[in-house]
Image (cartoon, rainbow, N blue to C red):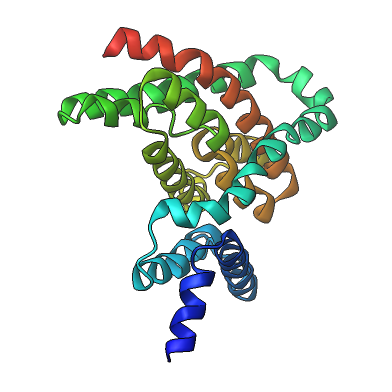
Amino acid sequence: MTDVADLWSYLSTTPLIWLTTTIVAYLVSDGVARRLGYPPWANPVLLSVLLIAPVLWLTRTNYTTYFEGAQFIHFLLGPATVALAIPLWDNRDTIRASVAPIVLALIVGSVVAAGSVILLARTFGLPTEVLLSLAPKSTTAPVALGISEAIGGLPALTAVLVILTGIIGAVTVTPLMNLLRVSDWRARGFAAGVAAHGIGTARAFQVNPVAGAYAGIAMALNALLTSLIVPVLIRWLV
């Protein structure tokens, strides 16, 4: 038992153990979701969180130690976001033919996502740092963290809120769109990308390739627009 405890004490301080834990948890979660037919509630990111959180709690591992390993996956979010230029380019003809509705939907979605959470945070009297951390929650993590830091928020809190937003959006987007009888895959995907960034985009690709492409387009454009409008909304509403 002493040898096992010594081995764990060593492994728990190395980045490799938490990198491996994260990858294994996601592979297991994705396998479970695949066997279930990818229902909305069996989101691989959500299942991964449910697997990793008890491990961190039982081992008394703090976030800083865990992130030393997980940061290698976090780094890949940047290149993945840049790679969204590919579906943007592949669908340039349809985008060019629908510029007006795309721009309108993008502006409304971005302003409502940021503005509504700022107003709700003010209404409930949340601390200013929390409010600033909430504002960029609907954009992709690399951009949201940069915005949060620039406007005086807490990047660590923003990261948690971004993940929660993505999970909630990915879980609810399909039943919500079915309830509203929205059948156009372009509209469904675009809504998922604007509201739930990368996790919503991944869900859209699972459902339909056209929805996934438009979700990727929305996610990329929303990242750009959010970085421009959030500082303005903060000055105006706070």
Instruction: Specify the quadrant of the image occupied by residue 22.
Output: bottom right
Instruction: Specify the quadrant of the image occupied by residue 31.
Output: bottom right
Where 2 falls versus 183 (above or below)?
Answer: below
Where 188 falls versus 105 (above or below)?
Answer: below
Where 236 falls versus 22 (above or below)?
Answer: above
Q: Is residue 183 visible?
A: no
Instruction: Specify the quadrant of the image occupied by residue 102.
Output: top right
Where 12 falls versus 212 (above or below)?
Answer: below
Q: Position of residue 132 (x, y in %)?
A: 33, 25
Q: Quick one: quadrant of the N terminus?
A: bottom left
In this orientation, which residue lies closer to the viewer: 214 or 237? 237
Q: Residue at x 19, y 31 (%)?
A: 126
Left or right for 109, reference 35: left
Q: Residue at x 66, y 42 (%)?
A: 185
Left or right for 210, reference 203: right
Q: Quick one: quadrant of the C terminus?
A: top left
Q: Position of residue 219 (x, y in %)?
A: 61, 32
Q: Residue at x 69, y 16 (%)?
A: 99
Q: Position of residue 164 (x, y in %)?
A: 41, 47
In this orientation, which residue lies closer to the viewer: 26 or 109? 26
